[in-house]
Image: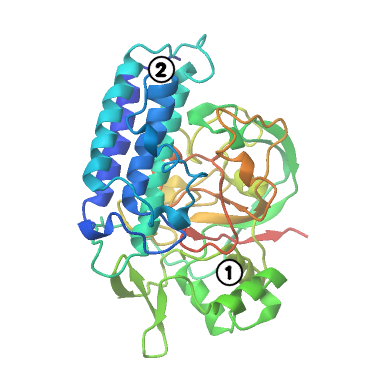
Amino acid sequence: MTPAPDAIAERLEAVREHTLAILEPLDPEWITRSPDPIMSPPAWDMAHIAAYEELWLVTRLGQSPPLHPDMADTYDAFATPRAVRGEIRILDAEESREYMRRTRERALAVLAGADLSEDAPDLTRGGFVWHMVAQHEAQHNETLLQTLQLMPAGTFSPCAVTLPPAAAPVTGPDPVAIDGGPLMMGSDGAHGALDCERPCHPTEVASFLLDRHPVTIGRHLEFMADGGYAHPGHWSEAGWAWRCEADITAPLHWQPDGEGGWQRTQFGCTESLDPAEILCHVSFFEAEAHARWAGGRLPTEHEWEMAARPSPTSRNEVWAPWGDTGHEGRANLGAHSFRPSHAGAYPAGVAPSGCEQMMGDVWEWTSTRFDAYPGFRAFPYREYAEPFFGNENRVLRGGSWATQSVAARITFRNWDLPERRQIFAGLRLAWNTA
């Protein structure tokens, strides 16, 4: 079905409002600074969002020149890596906002005359390129929140909504048996699926067990109390080398509380740990070590998708484990909570497999290395995913509390290096059945 231009414009505007709202509580002095070389100054992300929209919607579709041709390399993510973005000339906050505003005006003018029909070229058919641009901005919203979480106390003070309580505390693993069999994995393009999610293809998955909920803070505290960070037997060789070299003794943002326990700093606010909350800010190496300590392992991404799909053998794609309805009351998405929820807090979002909270709260590490699906075709540009195939990146699934629904779906593949901890990532345990 051909989408209405007004609906596409509303989606773009909703994401833009979210971008600006995220940055509203930020100390203006920090908008052009980065707290860590692995992240960008927020103003760089703002102008990069505009440059990406301008490239695809204004320059390539509209055949109009860019507003800042002299800064094309500055806002090219490959030409200007993160480590140098805080050291070069970039647009300031007001210049970046103006760049975003003017680009959006020009992009909407192109949209008004675009062919979105099923007979249109791949780029515009069904509004694909506009959905891609909205997703790109939403993904940078999450990256912005990672940056803001790394900033010093007092520089960013968001207002968070109250999360629903769980009906009963989740105190340990609750394995759900998942029958093996055929799986139609990936996407043929529904809900704006990007190239690394395509094509939908058949595969076989053996029977396995998957924890009903993601691992909680309380369970990770048990891992720590049992010497989890000091016992090399729980760790891979690479993970143990990383842990020792970086002197890792707890998840990112955790500190000793001075009384033999632990606390954390959450967006500049130091607070006690809530054992019922879903664990966040652990690396793949930490997730893998926790899983081994617990007598399990991390799921493969095939297993994760098998458990998340409402119909594993169908190509009829829905965006969430519960179907195609909205996420309100079913998942912690949209960057309103600024933290994961309690395990068990969203029973209405349960997948037919019986697993809960597979969408939102935290990205879930899988054991799978990021690579191309059979029949992969880079589209509309190879730099989105292809350069990251076949190296150390691991796949993450499910989205986090910071992910917007426009960039969340059961086929979405996130990826990162195994040592990364600034991302809003946790884990879910899996076990073999035999």
Depth order, front residue of 267/98: 98
Along the horizontal axis of the image, is 331 left or right of 385?
A: left
Residue 327's spot in the image, x, y percent? 38, 41
In the rendered image, the quadrant that contains the C terminus is: bottom right
Is residue 344 visible in the rendered image? The answer is yes
Q: Residue at x 47, y 59 (%)?
A: 38
Q: Percent x, y for residue 32?
A: 30, 54
Front residue of 235 and 354: 235
Query: Which residue lies most toward the front here?
Result: 70
Q: Which mark is residue 286?
A: 1
The image shows residue 214, relative to residue 65, as above or below, that is: below
Q: CA distance from mark 2 to mark 1?
A: 48 Å
- Answer left or right for 168 relative to 303: left
Q: Are marks 2 and 1 in contact (CB under 8 Å)?
A: no
Report the residue marked by disc 2: 63
Query: Can you tell which quarter of the image residue 180 is in?
Result: top right
**Residue 263 at what x, y percent from top left?**
37, 78
Does residue 375 appear to the left or right of 326 in the view shown?
right
Q: Secondary structure at mark 2?
A: loop
Q: How many marks?
A: 2
Question: In terms of image quadrants, where is residue 12?
Answer: top left
**Residue 401 visible in image:** no
Q: Where does residue 318 sit, x and y in percent of width and height? A: 51, 32
- Residue type at mark 1: give it: Glu
